[in-house]
Image (cartoon, helix red, strand yellow):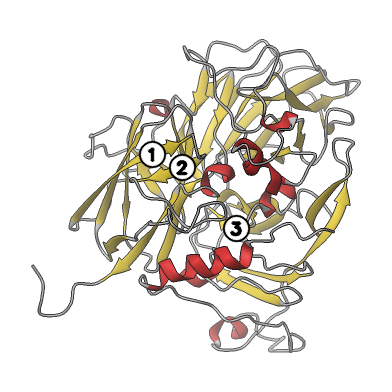
């Protein structure tokens, strides 16, 4: 396979120079060894020891190049254990997470555990939280799971995520708060039939344009109630639902009367979806892994990287299509919930009901708990989301992060300094004409239903929020997980061209407090 990321080493060194002032914690590369026969009679003994590998990994990920044709065109890919998406990780509340990452590529890689509250050096962001795993080396990731819900994992090196390095990560409750008969993961991705490293040069006019960077044609799906068309960067040739295209759709078999917990995960690189199930309403019970007061909806608009857990009761015998409609394009990818039917998919455009939740309607959600953070000093940070479309560069707070496609003379992003115990209030104002799914690593945040309502007690807890053109969004988090944490747009093409910053935990110099 052709080396996909020819400029990665240069980018990583530039990124390291920026983050050096933030005292980034860098984790050593660990090679799995000596995993057999340790304290077999005491299952807790290994977890009490420090400084050596104690147990076999629960998962071994072989990250390797491949040529795949999910939409009929042979394309260079990066797969985990030979599959796209990668294997589903599934644990129970309170477990210790252990996975051995084996890099069989000819370039470095990392894996980020999206939405997971992890030690800083296990977060998988190159040269911010760890050294990238070199080609031919392995790295053991191990940390306690302190949450439940639906999450996912993906590469944070270059554009590796776009070509297959991603997959679902589920943490089950030991005592589920709802009854259901089936727990079903629904993981949706986008796909390009070419090397994604060519796309940004095409957008910038540095290479001949392919169909992938042209304005989509046809009757495009739009955000409900929007007056302007939904703008997209990439005109995708198609999408994959649990790794399957519409040519051979994913099917889940059940019976009439079954209650399903569908874990909807938008694992796409830049595509936003409107999701609906023919003939059924969905009852949303979780947003980004966190509980919400149940919300009934006919469809859900899902920003990149968002997750919604929904309950659905299958009302009758038959086959019911689950539609993932790509906003800004005329295409969809489908799966089938089959209750003793013929499992035939409905490829017509869905007839959406009137109730839409999710992106654009976050005001519908409330937490069932009081989410006000502990008392502490308030640190307010205001950041404009901006863009320079003549050069296809994206900024945060007027600064550009030194990512893959940001020229050295432009890369000027400085750390956002916070301190342990602060209540960090972030105001995002979108000055662009595109949606930006904004994700914070290492923390959850309280997303306010109304900007400025910092006293809202039941604000929903999330880790990713879609910020629309002209919108202002306020969120708040408690600074209780020290380190250096990436904050970025989860549209990979916006991230790769600068829309990111780093939250850096620091301290006041002793004796020099203001």
For disc 1, the neighbor class at 10 Å (few under 14, some 14 to 19, many from 20) is: many
As helix, strand or loop, the secondary structure at mark 3 comes to loop
| Residue 189 position (above or below residue 362) | below
Comparing labels 3 and 1, the label whose residue is closer to the camera: 1
Chain-order first, disc 3 or disc 2: 3
Comparing labels 1 and 2, the label whose residue is closer to the camera: 2
Check residue 394 in the rendering and tell me which mark sits there, or answer none. 2
| Residue 130 position (above or below residue 357) | below
- Residue 405 screen position, x and y as percent: 56, 51
* Dot 1 and dot 2 residues touching (CB under 8 Å): yes
Residue that appears at 59% across and 49% down: 151
Left/right placement of residue 424 relative to residue 162 reads: left
Q: The C terminus appears in which quarter of the rendering?
A: bottom left
- Residue 263 screen position, x and y as percent: 64, 39
Q: The N terminus appears in which quarter of the rendering?
A: bottom right
Check residue 156 in the rendering and tell me which mark sits there, or answer none. 3
State which quadrant residue 363 falls in: top left
Does the image show residue 119? no
Chain-order first, disc 1 or disc 2: 1
For disc 2, the neighbor class at 10 Å (few under 14, some 14 to 19, many from 20) is: many
Check residue 385 in the rendering and tell me which mark sits there, or answer none. 1
Q: How far is the residue under mark 1 from the one under mark 2?
A: 8 Å
- Residue 248 screen position, x and y as percent: 89, 31
Pick the front one: 451 or 500: 500
State which quadrant residue 22 falls in: bottom left
As helix, strand or loop, the secondary structure at mark 2 comes to strand
* Dot 3 and dot 1 residues touching (CB under 8 Å): no
């Amino acid at each position: 396979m052709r080396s996909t990321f020819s400029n990665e080493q240069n980018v990583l060194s530039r990124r390291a120079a920026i983050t050096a002032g933030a005292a980034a914690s860098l984790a050593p590369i660990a090679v799995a060894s000596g995993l057999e026969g340790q304290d077999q009679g005491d299952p807790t003994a290994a977890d009490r020891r420090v400084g050596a590998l104690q147990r076999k990994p629960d998962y071994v990920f072989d990250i390797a190049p491949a040529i795949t044709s999910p939409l009929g065109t042979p394309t260079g890919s990066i797969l985990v254990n030979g599959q796209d998406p990668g294997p589903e990780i599934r644990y129970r509340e309170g477990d210790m997470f252990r996975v051995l990452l084996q890099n069989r590529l000819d370039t470095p890689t990392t894996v980020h555990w999206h939405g997971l509250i992890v030690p800083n050096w296990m977060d998988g962001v190159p040269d911010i939280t760890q050294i990238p795993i070199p080609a031919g080396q392995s790295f053991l990731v191990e940390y306690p799971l302190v949450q439940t819900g639906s999450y996912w994992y993906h590469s944070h090196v270059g554009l590796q995520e776009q070509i297959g390095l991603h997959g679902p990560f589920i943490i089950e409750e030991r005592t589920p708060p709802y009854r259901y008969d089936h727990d079903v993961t629904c993981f949706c991705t986008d796909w390009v039939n070419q090397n994604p490293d060519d796309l940004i040069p095409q957008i910038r006019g540095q290479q001949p344009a392919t169909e992938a960077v042209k304005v989509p044609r046809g009757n495009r799906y739009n955000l409900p109630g929007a007056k302007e068309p939904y703008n997209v960067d990439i005109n995708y040739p198609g999408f994959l639902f649990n790794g399957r295209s519409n040519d051979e759709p994913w099917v889940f078999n059940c019976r009439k009367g079954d209650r399903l917990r569908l874990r909807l995960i938008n694992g796409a690189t830049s595509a936003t979806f409107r999701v609906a199930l023919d003939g059924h309403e969905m009852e949303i019970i979780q947003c980004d892994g966190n509980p919400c007061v149940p919300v009934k909806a006919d469809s859900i608009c899902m920003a990149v990287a968002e997750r919604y857990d929904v309950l659905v009761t299958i009302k009758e015998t038959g086959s019911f299509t689950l539609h993932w409609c790509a906003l800004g394009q005329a295409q969809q990818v489908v799966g089938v919930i089959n209750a003793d039917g013929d499992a035939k998919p409905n490829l017509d455009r869905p007839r959406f009901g009137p109730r839409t939740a999710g992106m654009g309607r976050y005001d519908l959600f409330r937490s069932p708990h009081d989410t006000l953070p502990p008392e502490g000093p308030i640190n307010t940070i205001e950041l404009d989301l901006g863009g320079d479309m003549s050069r296809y560069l994206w900024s945060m707070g007027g600064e550009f992060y030194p990512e893959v496609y940001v020229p050295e003379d432009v890369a000027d992003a400085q750390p956002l300094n916070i301190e342990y115990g602060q209540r960090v209030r972030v105001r995002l104002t979108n000055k662009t004409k595109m949606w930006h799914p904004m994700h914070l690593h290492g923390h959850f945040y309280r997303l306010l239903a109304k900007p400025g309502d910092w006293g809202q007690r039941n604000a929903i807890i999330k880790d990713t929020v879609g910020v629309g053109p002209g919108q202002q969004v306020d969120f708040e988090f408690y600074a209780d997980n020290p380190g250096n944490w990436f904050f970025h747009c989860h549209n990979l093409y916006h991230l790769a061209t600068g829309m990111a910053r780093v939250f850096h935990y620091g301290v006041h110099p002793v004796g020099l407090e203001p």
